[in-house]
Amino acid sequence: MATKMDERLEFVYQEILKRNPGEAEFHQAVREVLESIGPVLTKYPEFRERKIIQRICEPERQIIFRVPWLDDRGEVQINRGFRVQFNSALGPYKGGLRFHPSVYLGIVKFLGFEQIFKNALTGLPIGGGKGGSDFDPKGKSDNEVMRFCQSFMTELWRYIGEYTDVPAGDIGVGGREIGYMFGQFKRLTSKYEAGVLTGKGLDWGGSLVRTEATGYGATFFVAEMLKARSDSFGGKTCTVSGSGNVAIYTVEKIHQLGGKVVACSDSDGVIHDDKGIDLELLKQLKERERRRISDYVGYRKHATYVAGGNIWAVPCQVAMPSATQNEINGKDAATLVKNGCIAVGEGANMPTTPEGIKVFLDAGIAYGPGKAANAGGVATSALEMQQNATRDSWTFEFTEQKLASIMRTIHQNCWETAEEFGSKGNYVVGANAAGFIKVAKAMVAHGLI
Ligand code: GLU
């Protein structure tokens, strides 16, 4: 990282470690922010006096609940549900729900913490929150997913609302799950409160471009980073990890901008297609048929599949990690740089370990951290809320233009803030400092709450 943590912040960090034992991902996310904001506290001593850091690292509210449901054999299953309402200085809590067996409080808190600053960077009126469950949707029938979502919402509904907390999707939660949860919320409240969830279906309150937004936005962000270096996607070889919603629409936008994606992955393995990933086939397998990526090579004979392979070993000029946290370690980062990678844009949340980030920053490549690069998803959720509030619906072109302009502004803001605090070209410092300052100023204005 660019700066070592200053001594007083190190003390604050040690207190946070003690207060939140065993939450490694949360510690990692906090550390990264604290390492960036030393110079900010020199400029704004009131943030230190009002203990903004200690307050920002403590969620406003955390809800943990039992989610019982019946599987198709009639057997009782129990999962754990979470919603961490982290910070409401800028607006109602906003952030996705993740359904994945790895989910525990430390994951939800890291995601909720990052969400505060990401949402601030969008410039839209949304606070930060996150939730989810250790439910594993893999291999579950549609009916099982529905029963789980209904049970999850039967507890969550009393804590959310268009002016309080607005969940959306994340890993394991897409349009289908949002539909089942919205249906149950409507039934429990007898209200058609469209703005309570985002990522809704297009026929019932959803926004055009929301599905594409995270991937498109991340690609726009990388295009801006390349532009700042008088470069572009044209003719670039790219790799995109993952094959979910973020990855698919990252591939789509890279292809539209003239780049070629040659590899993507899932948790079982990697496909390599040097003619360029066949996007329609990918969509068919993953979106419509919910299959594994290994099936891709059955349709594209020249492509290869490596079970357990490492996508970062595939040479590329632009890498877009779009799967999950800590998927690029120091060694992977070194391999990428050695193979000629000049830009990394994070579609996933915290996909690069601190060691990996250091490698990218030391090499001087364009590195766009998730907080900034993947903010297009939640930004478009805020645009969905705007349309719901005015009972309006915008065209695809209009909404995409808004997304592109938001991503340009985020890039500019990160660039200028990094420069202001003496770390020119370092988007980590830029994103953390810019996001933090915005939230901190609002917290100061609201008094000690
Ligand atoms: N889960 C997404 C994220 O990490 C989107 C959240 C939302 O749309 O509220 O930002």
Image: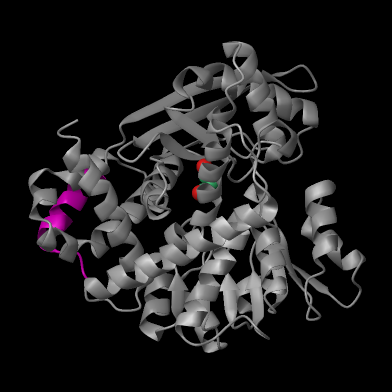
Quarter occupied by the N terminus: bottom left
Image quadrant assignment for residue 443: top left
Can residue 374 be seen here? Answer: yes
Relative side of 411 to 405, left or right: left
Query: Nearest the camera: 159 or 230?
Result: 230
Question: Which portion, as a residue range, is magenta?
Answer: 1-18
348 in relation to 159, above or below: below
Q: Is 395 located above or below residue 280 in the figure?
A: above
Instruction: Verify whether residue 10 appears in magenta.
Output: yes
Instruction: Measuring from the top left, give residue 35's x and y in whole percent.
Output: 25, 63
How many numbered discs?
0
Judge by depth and name the residue closer to the eye, 307 or 321: 321
Which corner quadrant holds the C terminus? top left
Q: Residue at 52% across / 39% down in the picture?
A: 386
At 55% from the left and 56% from the top, the residue drawn is 402
- In the image, 68: left or right of 139? left
Magenta residues, dominant SS class: helix
**Side of 323 where 296 appears, left or right:** right
**Magenta span includes 201:** no
The x and y percentages for residue 18 are: 22, 43
Colour scheme employed for the rendering of this structure: one colour
Residue 314 at x, y = what percent?
Answer: 65, 79
For image coordinates 23% across by 48% down, the residue present is 440
Residue ID at (70%, 60%): 248
- Inspect this view and state whether residue 332 appears: no
Whole-percent x, y for residue 439 in the image: 28, 47
